[in-house]
Image (cartoon, grey):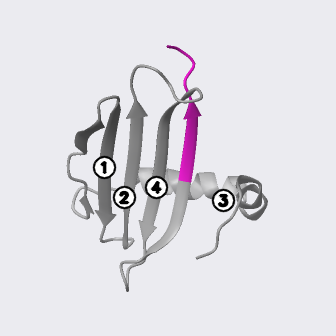
Amino acid sequence: MLILSEQQVRERLDLDESVAVLEKMFRRDYAGTVQMPLRTQMQTFSDLTCLVMPCSDSALPGAGVKLVTVRHGAHFNGDRVQADCFLLEQASGKVCAVGHRHQISCSS
């Protein structure tokens, strides 16, 4: 698996092309090809909620899972929300890409 920093991603992507692809994707009728079950939410520890959000699209074909943790109450070093997206390889089902989003809580 190739691991890129945010800067490396920015260097490799053409912004205009990326916007055009995203626009095309959002305009198409995906009702017949997308499977997106309701997210699963569970209280993992007394102050932590875990959200699991799978999705697949047979027209691409692609599948992925977003995993989010939300800390309630006292924050650990200011971190409140962590989110990771896992893209699955079609042939093997293995994780072929991971995206991480780190958010800092602005309020208590």
User: 87 or 56: nearer the eye?
Assistant: 87
Q: Which amino acid does label 3 sit on?
A: Glu
- Is mark 1 in CB contact (under 8 Å) with mark 2? yes
- Is mark 1 in CB contact (under 8 Å) with mark 4? no
Spot occupied by residue 38 in the image (x, y as percentages of width and height): 20, 46
Q: Which of marks 1 and 4 is nearer the N terminus?
A: 1
Answer left or right for 51 relative to 7: left
> Which mark is on residue 85?
4
Residue segment shown in magenta? 100-108
Q: What distance separates the C-alpha of mark 1 from that of mark 4?
A: 10 Å
Q: Earlier in the sequence, mark 3 or mark 2?
A: 3
Q: Viewer-nearest of labels 1 and 3?
A: 1
> Which mark is on residue 17?
3
Q: Which amino acid does label 4 sit on?
A: Cys
Q: How many marks?
A: 4
Q: Viewer-nearest of labels 3 and 4?
A: 4
- Is mark 2 in CB contact (under 8 Å) with mark 4? yes
Q: SS at mark 4?
A: strand
- Is mark 1 in CB contact (under 8 Å) with mark 3? no
Q: Which amino acid does label 2 sit on?
A: Val
Asked which quadrant contains residue 54, the reply is bottom left
Crowd around label 1: few <14 · some 14–19 · many ≥20 (10 Å): some
Check disc 1 and report the residue beneath it. Answer: 52
Q: What distance separates the C-alpha of mark 1 from that of mark 2?
A: 7 Å
Q: What residue type is labelled 1?
A: Val
Spot occupied by residue 105 in the image (x, y as percentages of width and height): 54, 24
Q: Residue at x 38, y 86 (%)?
A: 91
